[in-house]
Amino acid sequence: MDHPMYLKDVVTLKLDQEKCTGCGMCLEVCPHAVFKMNTRHVEIENRDACMECGACSRNCPFEAITVRSGVGCAAAMINVILGRTDQPCCGEIDCASSDKKTAACC
């Protein structure tokens, strides 16, 4: 499955390799396959695909992942869906549909 790309190099996602034990919980909860498992630990494979939903950081039992959820495209998508704005969520021309209930970046 192709994953959406958001604004390049703006995501707040950080992974502390020293804290990561390789449990793989982030792999399970990430909706956009941002992470991959290397031999013993998780790595960020595609940072720009992160929608900053915060699922990875909330579910990491070792606090190895931080992300400011609610910023970036995730917040913009929510604002479009709630009708707070009708602007495309991440600068893409066709990013948000005209139907606010189905508007999304993905």
Image: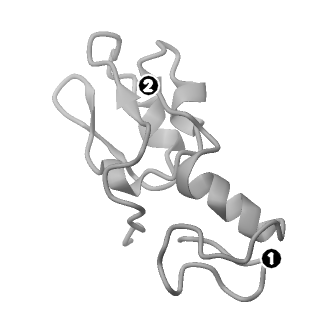
Q: Position of residue 73 (x, y in %)?
A: 55, 58
The span from disc 1 to disc 2 (Cα, nearest Å) is 31 Å
Residue sitting at x 31%, y 50%? 9
The N terminus sits in image quarter: bottom left
Instruction: Describe the element under mark 2 as helix, strand or loop.
Output: strand
Q: Picture coordinates of residue 76 (x, y %)?
A: 64, 60
Q: In the rendering, at what x and y percent does residue 86 appear?
A: 73, 77
* Residue 65: mark in rendering: 2
Q: Which residue type carries mark 2?
A: Ile
Q: Residue at x 29, y 51 (%)?
A: 46
- Mark 1 lies on a secondary structure that is loop
Q: Amino acid at mark 1?
A: Lys
Q: Is residue 35 above or below residue 94?
A: above
Badge 2: residue crowd in 10 Å (few <14, some 14–19, many ≥20): many
- Within 10 Å of disc 1 (Cα), the crowding (few <14, some 14-19, many 20+) is few
User: Would you identify the image quadrant in which residue 17 lies?
Assistant: top left
Residue 101: mark in rendering: 1
